[in-house]
Image (cartoon, rainbow, N blue to C red):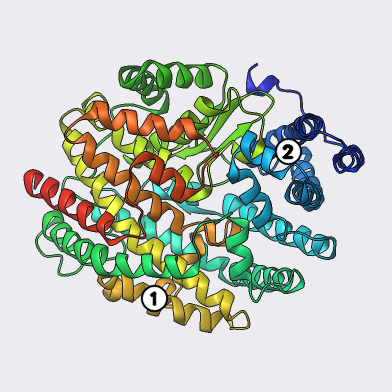
Amino acid sequence: MIFDQLLYERPNIVKFEEVVFELLGKFDSVNSFEEQFKLIDKINSLRNHVLTMMTIAEIRAQLDTSDKNYQEEQKFINKNWPVYEKVVASYYERLIRSTFKEQIKQKYGKQLLNLAEINVNTIGSSVIDKLKRENNLISEYTRLMANAKIEFKGEERNLSQLDKFVSSPDRMLRKQAIEKKYELLEQYENRIDELFDSLIQVRTQIAKELGYNSFVELGYARLSRVDYGQQEVADFRKMILKYMVPISEKLREKQRIRIGIGIENLTYYDEEVRFKTGEAILKGDSNWMIEKFKTIFQQLSNQPGEIFKLMHENKYMDLTIKENKARGAYTTYLCNEKIPYIFANFNGSRKDVKVLAHEFGHAFQMAIFNQNNNIPEFILPTKEACEISSITMEFLIWPYMEEIFGDDAMNYRYSHLEDAIFAMPYRASIDEFQHFIYTNPNLSSVERKKKWIEIEQKYMPYKTTYNHSYLKKGNFWHQQTHLFKFPFYYIDYAMAQICALQIWSIAQKDIYTAWNVYMDICKQGGRLSFLDLLDHSGIASPFKEEAFENMINSIDTWFSKND
């Protein structure tokens, strides 16, 4: 069914809670694991319906943040999502203490019980109101960033629309555009600081009430990190500092030289420009690009081609910037329809190609695995694992870039690989910043910003010469949605990037083998933990130095050949 024609009915959370608890009441008293399996199926069917309705409402609320009806539905979700989570936590309790725990493990795999055990303590009746407040704060940040506008070049433009100009080959134009962007953000600086401070406080309160030392531990549990912890992530950041920061700085210096004589230092308005002539140029609009991607995915393999065509024809993607549309890009899944949905904001830059490939990587994994899956926990792998399928897809389409960029295709590949390198120090910065602020929740906004500057200069030394008042105050992170909506998630992209680059390295020699590795990962869905998935697929863990050493050699070789 076409997305616009999907019927939305506000889910009856009270009834959902009553029915599930009635089923859970039978769970302990049944005499066979077959009967428990039937109860699990019934509970999951009820959950899938609620998730489907909430997902429809959230998509529509973000497609138009001025739509009063769906903004009301978003408020309903913010209020009732914690109730849904509380019900699911009760279900997890039954799984954990089931007499037939071993049979459950044999049928569904150990990951379901691992997820139950780590998530059972992320919710409680005493924190329901605080969880509602957390959700409302996140929604306010989303609306603020979607609706903020400023006049530029004769038009009112939002943040996403301004981003189109920040990579212009016209240095004066991109300087004007990014200064307008920071002027706009500066208007909301105090409110963003207030929202973030409120989020830190309410998350810390929730964590304390649930028995955690700080929100850091709760944040890890929410992300279902079942087979590694803070020490492994800290060690991962150290390896980024050791391996990725030096190559990033070297590439930034090459970029400075490449984009023009007379630029003594990169500035905040030069950072996104990789070539003196500008970026690789798209040869058409978003509709043109969709048609190109239909061909590309069909050439890659029949399955991605068919899935992309199905999603497009049934309007399970909305890719263009619109007034009052929320910022960002994501892929979600409609359980009852068994189809993914892609949300994005194309601005006409080369990064639109990366965004569409990335989000379709998620969509493809969901579509491949979930045709025969009804377990909500397995729709996606855990965050760091699910990002492997999305980031790898960005690289698997490399052979077809001439169809989009023509003679600029190699410039696109060069910039895209640079993107992968440049992103990792930034993601480590965001992660270290989060660990610091949630370990020290009573800092003032000024103290937080001072710490951001310290961390930013540690991982991205080239930024020390940036001379803009908004940036010099330590505000760059204000525009990083993950800090507000998905705490501790952002480093997952860097972990996945190390894994994806290993598959990219294989693809440089044998695209067929790389595709088979990729397909095997997608077919596992969420049945395996992160490290178990890597072991299954033969990919080196990002927590091991060999993963970095092998990847750096491949990167150096590629840049040497293509400089």
State how far apart marks 2 and 1 are (Cα): 38 Å
Q: Which residue is mark 2?
A: 54
Quarter where residue 361 is shown: top left
Q: Secondary structure at mark 2?
A: helix
Q: Secondary structure at mark 1?
A: helix
Q: Which residue is mark 1?
A: 455
In the rendered structure, find residue 91 and report the number of the disc placed on it: none
On the rendered structure, is 238 left or right of 223?
left
On the rendered structure, is 435 left or right of 405?
right
The residue depicted at 28 percent of the width and 61 percent of the height is 545
Residue 144 visible here: yes
The amino acid at mark 2 is Met
The one of 456 and 96 positioned closer to us in this rendering = 96
The one of 474 and 489 positioned closer to us in this rendering = 489
Residue 467 visible here: no
Residue 6 place in picture, x, y as percent: 71, 22
The residue depicted at 79 percent of the width and 48 percent of the height is 94
